[in-house]
Image: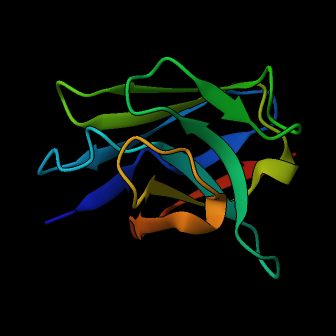
Amino acid sequence: QVQLVESGGGLVQAGESLTLSCLDSNRALLRNWMGWFRQAPGKEREFVAVISWNAVTSEYTDSVRGRFTISRDNAKGTLTLTMNRVTPEDTAIYYCGAQTTLYARGQNVDFGYWGPGTQVTVSS
């Protein structure tokens, strides 16, 4: 059974750093690409970053590349998003998700496992 739970959200000031974590409590997603998505008020959920099942490959949306880093520790069943130099535009609910097909990057729409989300608010 897949269970994902995010943590680490909160209120930060622009320019500061924040680290989000996602726990795959049953370690059921060790062979799945995993990623972070976010949804700002009044907007659709959007892709932020993704990492391969073996942590060799990662991808980022343009607006966070160079500021955010995605990583995973399969031994612990954790996915992490390190957010540096945050801006008010990074304010959103951040969701941890996983691809449903083993080993495949697939499309973002194929991410079928989700956590409940964690709120990140960046003040100017």
What residue do we see at 88% from left, 37% from top?
Answer: 62
On screen, residue 93 versus residue 78, left or right, reads right
Query: 20 or 88, which lies in front?
Result: 20
Q: Is residue 22 left or right of residue 15?
A: left
| Placement of the N terminus among the 4 image quadrants | bottom left
What's the coloring here? rainbow
**Nearer to the camera, 41 or 57:** 57
The C terminus is located in which quarter? Answer: top right
State whether residue 63 is above or below residue 28: above
Q: Residue at x 70, y 70 (%)?
A: 45
Q: Position of residue 65 (x, y in %)?
A: 80, 27
Vertical relation: 67 (above or below) 53: above
Q: Position of residue 31 (x, y in %)?
A: 30, 39
Q: Residue at x 84, y 41 (%)?
A: 87
**Based on the displayed image, in which of its 4 quarters is residue 115 positioned?**
bottom left
Q: Which quarter of the picture shows residue 76?
A: top left
Of residues 55 and 76, the one nearer the viewer is 55
Looking at the rendered structure, the number of numbered marks drawn on it comes to 0
Q: Position of residue 73 (x, y in %)?
A: 30, 24
Please name the residue shown 65% across and 40% down the image.
49
Placement of 4 over or under 44, stated as above or below: above
- Position of 85 with respect to 84 (left or right) is right
Q: Position of residue 67 (x, y in %)?
A: 76, 24
